Image (cartoon, grey):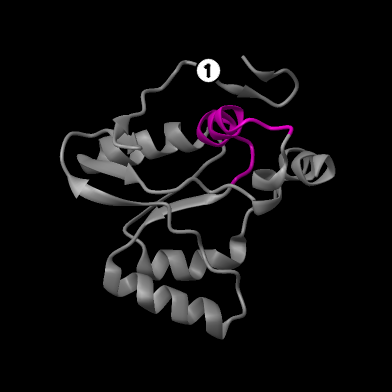
Amino acid sequence: LLKLVNQKLSKPKALVEWLPYLIKYSNATIDSSDGLINSLQHVANESNKAIYLKTLPINQKLLKNKKISSITLNEAVMFGGEEYEFIFTISKVNYSKLIDKFKESNLEPPIRIGIIKIGKSEVFFDNKVILDSGRSWDSIKGFK
């Protein structure tokens, strides 16, 4: 498990094979290298929309690890960074098309983490506004 986490942080791999499809089907795209919440707040601000997270993109192996508290894990997912995963917005129609293209190309499908609604430019999780905590991820020191 530790090897998986270390590899993800020390040798991040951008899913460049997704790019042609994201260019064609997505409305907005950003990477999560500065942290999920920071990136989502940027999208919310630029689009003047509210983002409602329904789930966090957490590896199933991490969920099963009893040594990691859910608070620590959620905080790491929301405020951590360096993993260069794509975050994108897409219409329902284009999402279906994207999933079909991913299946045709034998690509792992994206994880749907939330929805965008008309509203103040904020990010919500568990119906609570998530504010930038000022914490950030340092690849050497961890959270600071």
Residue 63, picture quadrant = top right
Please tell me which residue lies in front, 67 or 143: 67
Residue at screen point 60% across, 73% down: 107
What residue did someone put label 1 on?
A: 135
* Residue 29 horizontal/vertical position (percent): 41, 52
Within the magenta stretch, is there residue 79? Answer: yes
Check the image and report above or below for 112 versus 123: below
Residue 1, picture quadrant = top right
Residue 100 horizontal side relative to residue 17, left or right: left
Quadrant including the C terminus: top right
Q: Secondary structure at mark 1?
A: loop
Residues in magenta, as a range: 67-84
Please tell me which residue lies in front, 132 or 30: 132
Residue at screen point 78% across, 47% down: 4
Residue at screen point 61% across, 24% down: 137
Task: Specify the farthest residue to the right.
Answer: 3
Residue 123, picture quadrant = top left
* Residue 103 horizontal/vertical position (percent): 54, 81
* Residue 64 horizontal/vertical position (percent): 69, 47
Check the image and report above or below for 59 versus 72: below
Alpha-carbon neighbours of circle 1 within 10 Å: few (<14), some, or many (≥20)? Answer: few
Task: Specify the farthest residue to the bottom.
Answer: 104
